[in-house]
Image (cartoon, rainbow, N blue to C red):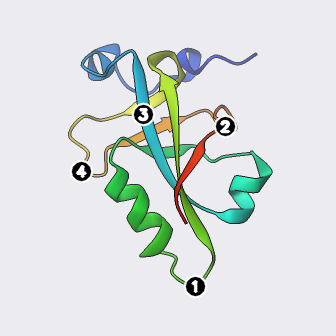
Amino acid sequence: MISAQEFRICSDESIQALPDVIKVYRGMSIAEYESGSFGMSWSIDQKVANDFAFVHYPDEPRVVVQSCITKKQILFYNPEDTEGEIVVLNDSITDGSILYE
């Protein structure tokens, strides 16, 4: 199995302040949610996920999904990023709960 730590493109220091278990959110299509194959870009900011679900893509059925990850799953995180983006290996998050439809 591929480890995110092998491919991490941020310093360990950049993720030190994060909790051991991190709540992440993603705005996605219903088709993506039903597939269980989720993308790489998530956010620690629920509002950002909401915007991606309903503002940036208003013409298709979408949802906001919450999941939890550990620091070991992080490929990239910049604590100064205004979107609170966390990038993980593609398909490394395979479960989540719908917060908004």
Distance, label 1 to label 3, CA atoms, is 27 Å
SS of the residue at dot 1? loop
User: At label 2, which amino acid type do we have?
Assistant: Asp
State the image coordinates of residue 59 (x, y, percent, origin top left).
57, 85
Dot placed on the residue nearer the N-terminal end, 1 or 3: 3
Q: Residue at x 56, y 22 (%)?
A: 7
Q: Nearer the viewer, mark 4 or mark 2?
A: 2
State the image coordinates of residue 11 (x, y, percent, origin top left).
34, 19
| Mark 1, other Cα within 10 Å: few <14 / some 14–19 / many ≥20 | few
User: At label 1, which amino acid type do we have?
Assistant: Asp
Q: Residue at x 31, y 44 (%)?
A: 84
Dot placed on the residue nearer the N-terminal end, 4 or 2: 4
User: At label 4, which amino acid type do we have?
Assistant: Thr
Residue tagged by mark 4? 82
Dot placed on the residue nearer the N-terminal end, 3 or 4: 3
Dot placed on the residue nearer the N-terminal end, 2 or 3: 3
Q: Nearer the viewer, mark 3 or mark 4?
A: 3
Dot placed on the residue nearer the N-terminal end, 1 or 2: 1
User: At label 3, which amino acid type do we have?
Assistant: Lys
